[in-house]
Amino acid sequence: MDFKLRIWRQKNASSQGKFVDYRLNGVSADSSFLEMLDLLNEQLIAEGEEPVAFDHDCREGICGMCGVMINGIAHGPKAKVTTCQLHMRTFKSGDTLLVEPWRAKAFPVIKDLVVDRTSFDRIVQAGGYISVSTGAAPEANATPVPKKVADRAMDAAACIGCGACVAACPNSSAMLFTGAKVTHLNALPQGQAERYDRAVLMVDQMDDEGFGGCTNIGECAAVCPAGISMDVIATLNRELVRGTLAGAGNR
């Protein structure tokens, strides 16, 4: 398969970026999108050019590191698939592929397709944790969790923190990400100690990072590779109201 690639190139965070065109021929249909970028980089290195910088880690759709915009869609055109699990057979030979980094104030570009997503880490640090007793491991069945509650928590915990929701949202909102983290922990009995503080603190941090507000457009859920539903945003809003009325989150 042959492709024309238009890739965002930016030397560093302070430099002006631009799209650069490349031709790549002989790509296997079974290659992943990242493997295709690897082939391009091998070609660039052989030609004495700077390779394209992009994030990656596990390449198994788990770590959330690999996100890029492909033809204007976060992670590309296939639903519930990360960039590393997107195969080139999804496209047609001869296609032009526009590849660019996440675009959000809270995700500044570091180089080429690499962005700084530590803002997500700071949201989690603000309240995405639980208090636990140290010492011997507790009996597994000492805290029974109803299956419906466990399923709800596990569905929300599927979020891999890739940032596609932010990149796809016209407002660059992080409500889906934050809602998933709050829903996961607030649903479980182990998360009740910080329940009200959690929502308030995490939303405050989200606002401090420069993420936009949610207007229920739904692009976030549409591009989420883990299939997180927008109902976690409704849960976050309810928990935020309860926490605010309870006077929680005072820093």
Image (spheres, grey):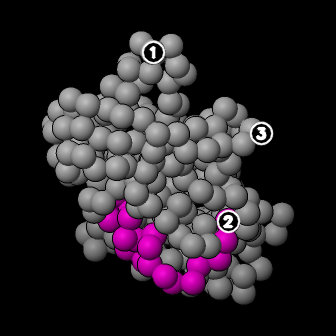
- Give the foreground label among 1 and 2: 1
Identify the disc placed on residue 222: none
Instruction: Identify which residue is drawn at 51% across, 84% down.
Output: 216
Say whether residue 17 is left or right of residue 113. Answer: right
What crowding class fits label 2: few (fewer than 14 Cα within 10 Å), some (14-19), or many (20 or more)? many
Vertical comparison of 50 with 161: above or below? above
Vertical comparison of 192 with 70: above or below? below
Instruction: Identify which residue is drawn at 51% across, 55% down.
Output: 163
The answer to whether marks 1 and 2 mark residues whose Cβ atoms lie closer than 8 Å is no
Residue 223, horizontal then vertical, whole percent: 38, 64
Vertical comparison of 173 with 54: above or below? below
Q: On the image, numbered disc 3 is attached to which residue?
A: 14
Name the residue nearer the viewer: 156 or 11: 11
**Figure quadrant of residue 244:** bottom right
Q: Which secondary structure lies at badge 2?
A: loop
Instruction: Identify which residue is drawn at 60% across, 67% down.
Output: 172
**Three-letter code, disc 2:** Phe
Instruction: Identify which residue is drawn at 42% across, 12% down.
Output: 46
Looking at the rendering, the stretch of residues picked out in magenta corresponds to 211-230
Q: Magenta: predominant secondary structure element?
A: loop
Residue 87, horizontal then vertical, whole percent: 22, 44
- Give the foreground label among 1 and 3: 1
Q: On the image, numbered disc 2 is attached to which residue?
A: 211
What crowding class fits label 1: few (fewer than 14 Cα within 10 Å), some (14-19), or many (20 or more)? few
Mark 2 or mark 1, which is nearer the start of the sequence?
1
Q: On the image, numbered disc 1 is attached to which residue?
A: 47
What crowding class fits label 3: few (fewer than 14 Cα within 10 Å), some (14-19), or many (20 or more)? few
The answer to whether marks 2 and 3 mark residues whose Cβ atoms lie closer than 8 Å is no
Name the residue nearer the viewer: 18 or 126: 18
Q: Calculate the distance from the C-alpha at mark 1 to the C-alpha at mark 3.
A: 26 Å
**Three-letter code, disc 1:** Glu
**Three-letter code, disc 3:** Ser
